[in-house]
Image (spheres, helix red, strand yellow):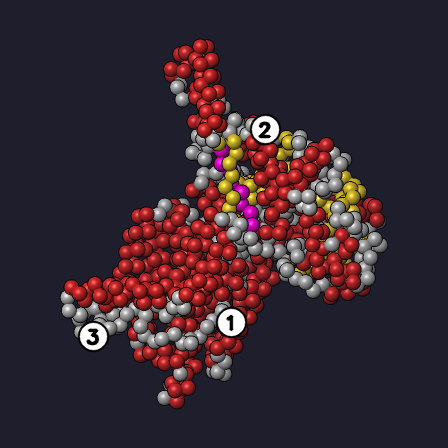
Amino acid sequence: MTENRFFNRSEFIGILLLAVFLVVVLPLTLDVFRLNLVAKYLTYAFVALGLVICWGYGGILSLGQGVFFGLGGYCMAMFLKLEASSVENTKIQSTPGIPDFMDWNQITALPLFWKPFHSLTFTIAAIILVPGIFALIIGTAMFKRRVGGTYFAIITQAVAAILTILIVGQQGYTGGINGMTDLRTLKGWDIRPDHAKIVLYFFEVGCLFACIMIAQFVRHSKLGRILVAMREKEDRVRFSGYSVANFKIFAFCIAAVFAAIGGAMFALNVGFMSPSFVGIVPSIEMVIYTAVGGRLSILGAIYGTLLVNFAKTSLSETFPELWLFGLGGLFIAVVLAFPNGLAGIWSDYVQPRIDRLISSRKPKPEGWTDSSVADGAPAE
Amino acid sequence: MSDEANKGLLSPLRRKLLMGMAAVPAITMLPRASFAQAPATSAVNTTGLAVTDTEVTVGILHSATGTMAISETGSIEAEKLAIEQINAAGGVLGRKIKFIQEDGASDWPTFAEKAKKLLVNDKVAAIMGCWTSASRKAVLPVMEQYNGMLYYPTFYEGLEQSKNVIYTGQEATQQILAGLNWIAKEKGAKSFFFIGSDYIWPRTSNKIARKHVENVLKGKVVGEEYYPLGNTQFNSVINKIKLTKPDVIFTDVVGGSNVAFYKQLKAAGIDLSKQALLTISVTEDEIDGIGGENIAGAYACMKYFQSLDNPNNKAFVPAFKKMWGEKTVIGDVTQAAYLGPWLWKLTVEKAGSFDIDKIAAASPGVEFKGAPEGYVRIHENHHLWSKTRVGRAKLDGQFELIYETADLVEPDPFPKGYQ
């Protein structure tokens, strides 16, 4: 019964456990401040989820996911900033009614490309479409010319660097290195108090599960199998008559859109957006989350993101001067000892025991052989 | 440990006995108040901050890691020194200061996260912290939402004023105008070339400087150039300087870029003993990296130099070096960071309370006579009245004081005619 287009039985249990963990356990055990931190971590889980499809299944390593995270985040932040910059909130400025950083930079009227962001509908469309179309353009330009592997990774890095420089340089239009701060309300609803943080957390978890479902669907469809085949032996897929480039573009676009949704969630939950999430370093960090979680596992990526960020927060609270070494050690340990990340530990050590436990009680059901990460050995 | 605890117990007991003889009725009515040697916690802390009968907790929030660590370390050290000195002198309202240090990691959202942690989880009574404008802008909404109190040490661009922040550095007009006036008068300067890092502080500072040069000094700005943070190629702007031959090069390049800038300036044959250069961004800390021989002769305009000759500074510099090592240097911001804990202590004692609202209200008018820079006073707008000074860089990396304003300069974060 649980075999369907989205998941097999062990995946179903995994998703159910994650849902219980995020919807019941965390909200009951954490105070609002910590829950809001989890909400912040989960925004990166969207990116990690996209990377599982794009990198884990498709074999396309993108080191520029921060670009899409940033585009989504900035779209959301522009809407929120406009709402926070009402004439009465900004009467101290020389030109009231425009965002504060424009006023500091001697801009006296709202630039044209900002105007549509007065509309929430437009903003939501932009969060999906702007990064999606941008990824389509980059993807088409690269994959149609059969640029792949390391070269593609380098180009995505360059794009991340270019976008950062653009945002920092055009500070009158973007807030520069300070970013957009002091975001306050969404359609008049204050996003800062505790109860709003809780509502936003559950909204975000809902969106995350929607994205997990999409990822699961892709994975179990014919498309997912072609992606894996492409990763393993690209030429064979091409010779079988498939357009490899189109599949790659699709995987890259879906990863970009997931990252953008994460970025928009970030702006909502944290009330802040800055170029420090767009550049090369955050983009690589996002790849690390996926690697720690296990790049072949959708759920692993989410646990990986949570684990790394939780370690980041708690190590830096306990050892303010040494925590980066601890974090670096964690990455090295995970990559050296467990190349398939957390998900690898689960499928190698934990899952077999659970299986044995269950099968010792009742006969093993037929046709159930998959474990959560079983399809496809690592590419290298 | 137990000895100390006993000592601590004895004296209030003795006090209780003494007070008991004098005021038996009062004690029976207010038994808890009699236990505290200082004013009762319930009276001085009505909003649930981390204040006990013997301790009060504050937060220190700077970058201990990342690109800004090199600048912010001095601030952390100065704040720890101030806290130690205050504790040695009896603490605040009879309570020892305990601090929780958090790392902003040169990352603005991390600053916001940690500020929130300090306020919401740790309930700190005040935060000494932030350095860059970007980190302050990220932290400000948190301070306002959770009603905290931030002591911010860096000279900055102004255009900001908050109930929840005390700005212990200078705002832009305070720092810049006196320096420009001095160089215009002293050097007869008429033409200026501006070079800055590309972010809000240099851009706003240069905007103010341009208005002042054009409208007040009746001079001319012959060039204005910006470079990204961390830039190390200044050859093109140095060529432009050679072509335009300005009377004064006015710079607000920050951080590591300074090292490249001054070395390339020297390599291009621009001699700072002949070409006047006025910087508002190079302190003793930066010269440590630039090298005294590359910048000797340049003028810097700010409120504090390590070489200041006054009794407060003569006590402060050795105390700092004793705690943090002979080789450490003390720049303008480090000194301003040192003021934070002291101003907070004085304000708490004036208000007779740790409550944020009472401190915010009591801050205007608080004076600190022991400041290494000399006397300072908090203005109605939560900035400091302070003198502005011009120093000339020497080969040994120190500044020689050339000029200081006769009076304290009024802080004016929203300067009319300069926006």
Q: Chain of mark 1?
A: A
Residue lying farthest to the left in this orientation: A362
Residue at 39 percent of width and 66 percent of height? A338
Residue B91 visible in image? yes
Residue at 79 percent of width and 63 percent of height? B268
Q: Nearer the viewer, residue B308 or A218?
A: B308
Q: Chain of mark 3?
A: A
Task: Tell us which disc is closer to us: 2 or 1.
Answer: 2
The image's mark for residue A156 is 1
Residue bearing mark 3: A367
Residue bearing mark 2: B89
Are labels 2 and 3 on one chain? no
Residue B5 is one of the magenta-drawn residues: no
Pointers 2 and 3 in contact (CB under 8 A)?
no
Expressed as whole percent of the image width and height from the top left, the position of residue B93 reads 52, 27
Expressed as whole percent of the image width and height from the top left, the position of residue B397 reads 75, 49
Expressed as whole percent of the image width and height from the top left, the position of residue B126 reads 52, 38
Q: Nearer the viewer, residue B208 or A261?
A: A261
Residue A130 visible in image? no
Q: Amino acid at mark 2?
A: Ala
Is label 1 in a helix, a strand or a loop?
helix
Q: Which residues are magenta?
A: B56-64
Side (left or right) of A161 relative to B321: left
Is label 2 in a helix, a strand or a loop?
loop
